[in-house]
Amino acid sequence: MGPTGEVVFGSPVPVCFQNRLRWDLNPEQILQLCDELIANTKTVYDSVGSLDVDSVTFENTLKALADVEVEYTVQRNMLDFPQHVSPSKEVRAASTEADKKLSEFDVEMSMRGDVYQRIITLEKKLDAGSLTAESKRYMERLIKLGKRNGLHLPTEKQEEIKTIKKKLSNLSIDFNKNLNEDTTSLSFTWDELGGLPEDFLNSLEKDGEKLKVTLKYPHYFPTMKKCFVPETRRKLEEAFNSRCKEENSAILKELVELRAQKCSVLGFNTHADFVLEMNMAKSGKKVAGFLEELAHKLKPLGDEERAVILKLKEKECQKRNLPFNGELYAWDTRYYMNQVEETQYAVDQNLLKEYFPMEVVTQGLLDIYQELLGLTFEQVDGASVWHPDVTLYCVKDRSSGQVVGQFYLDLHPREGKYGHAACLGLQPGCLLPDGRRQMSVAAMVANFSKPTADAPSLLQHDEVETYFHEFGHVMHQLCAQADYAMFSGTHVERDFVEAPSQMLENWVWEKEPLQRMSRHYKTGSPIPDELLDKLMKSRLANTGMFNLRQIVLAKVDQVLHTRTGLDPAEEYARLCQEVLGIPASQGTNMPATFGHLASGYDGQYYGYLWSEVFSMDMFFARFKQEGIMNPKVGLDYRKYILRPGGSEDASEMLRKFLGREPKQEAFLLSKGLTVELDAGTPCPC
């Protein structure tokens, strides 16, 4: 059992309660402020880089760089965040342009050999005992990053790396912009959308006599799960996995080649080894072993589930007078996996969502997080926001009354908006140049369906889970109290970053929290116990196939970043067949739609599964044992897992919270696997 006891929160230094973000900038202002930010930041780097090497001190070198990083981070986020959320196409375009300029500038500053040499000199000169643990970590991290940028190499090599990094940065921005701006839609007759609920059909835009289905999540997923017309699902699935096919296939090919080129210059065997050096896993070999072992354990479960799904398909084909050839296709999986939930577990998703009106879920979620983490949330009236749908909340520590930070909620889809669910840190919680603590500000962006004239926005249970997950990231952003912007919020190892949020997903599978965040949208009645029990049992539904698909994606990512000259679409198709036993649809290129490959998860998608080892261990070892709404455990969690941000190694945080080394047992059990006696030994992660 981990340590519990009185936990006192609150900053030992005064907190600055100012939210310094502005959302009323026009395109011209965005570009002008971008140029000013670059000039002002460069001045600081120039002054550090031109210091006489004998005169370097903590104040004029490390603190100068840390101070400018705080200012730069706030301003940069304010300029590049609108590309994901602004309702104005012109503002989005200006924000994308600013992001490209700033990303190029980031590369320039990361390649400052003169600044790097001053930090190296300072390290030799300083007595290690004169620095705080976090300042020492900051200095060591800057030196490590310098080496990872080749600053110890000859000048021509440095120039080559700089050119590659700039290209990579621009290509990544374009890859995701293409996906965000995609407006593809398909039109179907009412009959072609058979099986979909009336409230969903009524929410669709008309196209003459037909209804328009976009490829955005709130349209695509419900149709793939509920439409009984295979031809409709086929057309949609093929369109969805062919989004931006031409342009993004070319970008992805170039991204993979450039990454391999850069790691070769830096002396790494593969790009995967390069990125993994900074993670818990450390090497591609370890990741490959983890994925292979897990795939091996899950394969029998996946085969069983596949056989069940095939039987369901055969039955359905007989019922609807359709040909059956004993095969499963990519457009079948979501539909029949949903049927498994409804037949084997008798969970009617359409009935269930009537108990999850978004306002009730939001209120329940906010209440649970406040109680668990010792916080209070208050909506800020008349806040400056980027769209009328957006709300802003102020967060305070319940015991001290001190402001912790603020968060925005932007929950509905609109044209040009980021298409997934995500949490974005906007103002880092860290120390300001004057020694005060800057409060943290974050935004949660999602795409939950909008209310209609007849019904409020009703969430599917998996959307409630997503909501809980992303809001967990918001809490990580706000509760972290690092001194340096570099270690603020979720700036932990990439293969640990999902663990705190994944752990909090468990609450949407437990009776008490579920009751607190649900109520029938018409009658106000609670979810019947019978339906709740069925839902909780259904957590293991399709777990084999779902996790094998995660392994496919993780393996595609690893193989593209460990071997050269591969065709991403071919690799994806090979792994789908090999791991899942379901072919990818002809002519599609799923990797070209896989935003993670161009948004910082390259070589690191395995992290979703890897971090689940820790999330499940934390949940079962502490919360499940001591009470899932136990505020003492919640405060321990806030203290040991959330508060450090990235100022400590994840392995150290876990040891403190668990009171022991992590184990793999809870993770395997959560996947429906039987655990051998030695699974309680420390995990191979």
Image (cartoon, rainbow, N blue to C red):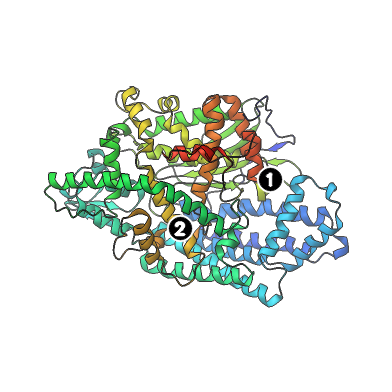
Q: Residues within 10 Å of mark 2 (few under 14, many from 20)?
A: many
Q: Is residue 83 left or right of residue 681?
A: left
Q: Position of residue 220 (x, y in %)?
A: 31, 50
Name the amino acid, label 2: Lys
Residue 198: numbered disc? none
- The mark tally for this picture is 2
Secondary-structure class at tag 1: loop
Q: Residue at x 68, y 45 (%)?
A: 647
Residue occupied by mark 2:
555
Q: Is residue 298 at all visible to an observer of this figure?
A: yes
Q: Is residue 147 left or right of residue 593?
A: right
Name the amino acid, label 1: Ser
Outermost residue, left direction?
321
Question: For this rendering, which residue is in front, 62 or 668?
Answer: 668
Q: Residue at x 66, y 48 (%)?
A: 487
- The numbered mark, 1 or 2, whose residue comes first in the sequence reads 2
Secondary-structure class at tag 2: helix
Q: Quadrant of residue 38?
A: bottom right
Q: Quadrant of residue 55?
A: bottom right
Q: Quadrant of the N terminus?
A: top right
Q: Residues within 10 Å of mark 1 (few under 14, many from 20)?
A: many
Outermost residue, right direction?
54
Residue occupied by mark 1:
647
Q: Residue at x 36, y 49 (%)?
A: 217
Q: Is residue 21 at all visible to an observer of this figure?
A: no
Vertical side of 672 occupied by 3: above or below: above
Spatial separation of the CA atoms under disc 1 and disc 2:
30 Å
Q: Is residue 256 left or right of residue 542?
A: right
Q: Position of residue 553 (x, y in %)?
A: 43, 55
Q: Position of residue 448 (x, y in %)?
A: 38, 42
